[in-house]
Image (cartoon, rainbow, N blue to C red):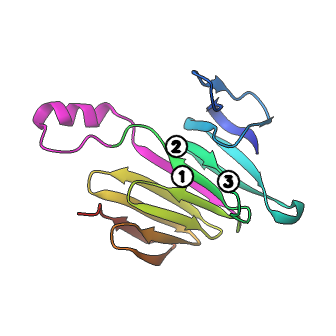
Amino acid sequence: MALAPANGVVLVRVPGATHAAALSGAASVPIGSIIDTRAGSVKLQSALPAGATQTGTFHGGLFEVRQPAGGHGMTELVLRGAPPACGAGGARAAAVASTRPPRALWGHDRHGKFRTRASNSVITVRGTTWYVADRCDGTLTRVRSGSVSVRDLGRRRTLVVRAGHSYLARPAR
């Protein structure tokens, strides 16, 4: 898998490393690397069957990159970082929630095979610009252009969300 910073600061922590390093130019990184785009954006290029490649641009989040065997080139972006601070913790919980960065990610691709895993849903992009965020009330998917397929894990159903619309997958009870 190849990465190149598009702008800002992008950090990469490869499997087995204890610290992340700044991405200063194009680099090849192993599957399982954790990419921090909270202060920048990155172009990610991954392999497809028959020697083809796909490229997506991602920013505003912390995610792990996976490419499952037998996935026919599907590249998974798994949201990482602390989940939102929720509950009846009163003022202390509110203070933690206001200082903790959101567990979210913006992405853009042109008909690649990218899938994002969040707490309550799995989002498969279909050539689009999209946003996904884990929140206290569920996982929000917002589509700016194109459409995405959202698998709601709690309701066990899949639906298509089109440009200008959003969907909130609530946690399973």
Q: Which residue is mark 3?
A: 67
Q: Quadrant of residue 148?
A: bottom right
- Do residues under tags 1 and 2 come within 8 Å of each other at their CB atoms? yes
Q: Earlier in the sequence, mark 1 or mark 2?
A: 2
* Residue 23 image offset from top left, x and y in percent: 70, 29
The kind of residue on which mark 1 rests is Trp
- Examine the structure image and report whether residue 56 is included in the region drawn in magenta: no
As displayed, is residue 50 above or below residue 132?
A: below
The kind of residue on which mark 2 rests is Gly
Q: Nearer the viewer, residue 114 or 172?
A: 172
Q: Is residue 117 left or right of residue 136?
A: right
Residue displayed at 65% across by 23% down: 21
What is the CA distance from the residue labelled 1 to the residue labelled 2? 6 Å
Q: Residue furthest front?
A: 69
Q: Which residues are magenta?
A: 84-110
Q: Earlier in the sequence, mark 2 or mark 3?
A: 2
The kind of residue on which mark 3 rests is Gln
Q: Nearer the viewer, mark 2 or mark 3?
A: 3
Q: Secondary structure at mark 3?
A: loop
Q: Which mark is residue 45?
A: none
Q: Residues within 10 Å of mark 3 (few under 14, many from 20)?
A: many
Residue displayed at 74% across by 37% down: 29
Q: Which residue is mark 1?
A: 106
Q: Which mark is residue 60?
A: 2
